[in-house]
Each structure stands twice: as C-alpha cells, then as structure tokens.
Image (cartoon, rainbow, N blue to C red):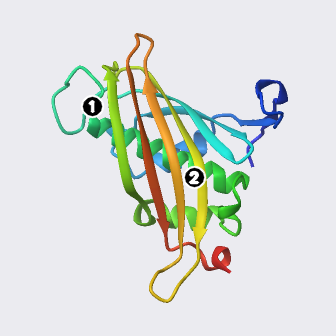
Amino acid sequence: MTTHTQDPATTTTGVAMMRYPNDPAIRERVLSPYRSHAKYLRSAEVRTEGEVVTAMCRLAVEESWYIDSTGHFNSVEFNICYNQVAYYLIAMTVQEHLIGVFDGWTMDDYWARQLPNVVISELRSRFRAPIDPLSFYGELAFTKTRFRARRADKAPLVIIETTCRFWDDNGGLSDGEVRLALTNPPEAATG
C-alpha cells in the first residue's frame, strides 16, 4: 500500500482529507497498454474527502499520435487524458480500499478489467480557453459511485459519476462530466 497522509486542516467540512502521493509503479502499469508517445499522465496525487476521491495530475501531450500538432489540447486528447487519469484513480482506489463499491476487488481483478471492462457510457466536455498541450494540469473526481446488482435482465455493474477539468498556467481551461460503467465486476465483489 501507498504511504498516505491525513490533512484535516485542508477541509471546510470537518472531514479529514487523506493524500496518497504519486505512485510511479501504479502509473507505469496503468499506462503500459499505451504506445510510448501516447503516455500523457506524468504524475498524480490522490485525495479523499468523505466519499469523494480525486486525482490531481500533471500531464503533457508532447506529440500527438494521430495528427500534426494543432497547437492546443483538443477533444481526442481530452478523452485519452481522461482515460489515463481515470485508470490511475481506479487503480489507487482499489489498492488503497478507498470506496466501498470496490470492496472485494484485488489489484489482479482490476488489471484484468482495465481495458475490456472500464467503459465510458456518457461524456460531456467543454473547451473554454485553449490549453497548451506541452504542460498542463488535470483534476478528476469520483463524485458518486454505486453498485448495480445482477437482475434477471441485466449483469452487475459498478457505475461511477465523475467530473474533470484540465487547465494550464496561461488561463487555458476545459471541463466535463463523464459516467463510467465497470462491467464484469469480480464475483467476490458482487456477493
């Protein structure tokens, strides 16, 4: 498990905030499916406050994998950066047992499901001011999580509502809301 710190002075709700520093081994494993020039997540710190789990990140898109440089962060890169941060945040949440819907999950369960079973079911993004893709920040929060048990007509799911934003030092900003569905949760987690 990662070393974490408790910082109750940083909250206004009276709930202690826990911080989990960047874990290079987890980040490298999360990014292992990506081509070397498409690994945009540089570092991430995970924070918890009550039921909300957040990743604060540094990112860089040094070279686009699919187009000549547009000179700004675009919607394809938004989606890829979101995915990389979300994968990291789920991995840390499983490893550190941060959210109840992941009770019963092991790291092996997560690694087996990272690509085939983490699905974006809804994505809304807004671009408010151009972001320099060479150096920017991100924040992704799991704001609501729930487990949908198996029903006669539906398989079990973990559903995660998220908010995210990306920004740079020059006023660039984009934000969005994304719903994740984690299909095929491990049997130990579904009871």
Determine the CA span between mark 2 and mark 1.
Answer: 24 Å
- Residue 12: horizontal and vertical position, in percent? 77, 27
The residue located at (70%, 48%) in the rendering is 51
Q: Is residue 176 left or right of residue 162?
A: left
Q: Amino acid at mark 2?
A: Ile
The amino acid type, in three-letter code, at marker 1 is Asn
- Placement of 4 over or under 148, stated as above or below: above
State the residue position of label 1: 74
Give SS at disc 1. loop
Total marks drawn? 2
Q: Residues within 10 Å of mark 2 (few under 14, many from 20)?
A: many
Q: Residue furthest top?
A: 170
* Numbered tag placed on residue 178 in the rendering: none
82 or 3, which lies in front?
82
The residue under label 2 is 90
Q: Residue furthest bottom?
A: 152
The picture places residue 126, in percent across and down from the top left corner, at 34, 33
Give the structural element (helix, strand or loop) at label 2.
Answer: helix
Q: Quadrant of residue 120?
A: bottom left
Residue drawn where x is 31% and y is 36% of the image: 77
Q: Earlier in the sequence, mark 2 or mark 1?
A: 1
In terms of depth relative to the viewer, which is nearer, 86 or 68? 86
Q: Which residue is at the front of the view, 172 or 2?
A: 172
x and y percent of residue 139 in the render?
A: 53, 33
Is residue 17 found left or right of 92 in the rendered image?
Answer: right
Q: Which quadrant would residue 185 be assigned to in this image? A: bottom right
Task: Specify the farthest residue to the front.
Answer: 13
The quadrant in which the C terminus is found is bottom right
Q: Residues within 10 Å of mark 1 (few under 14, many from 20)?
A: some
* Relative height, residue 12 to residue 30 (above, below): above
Q: Residue 48 placed where, x, y %?
A: 71, 41
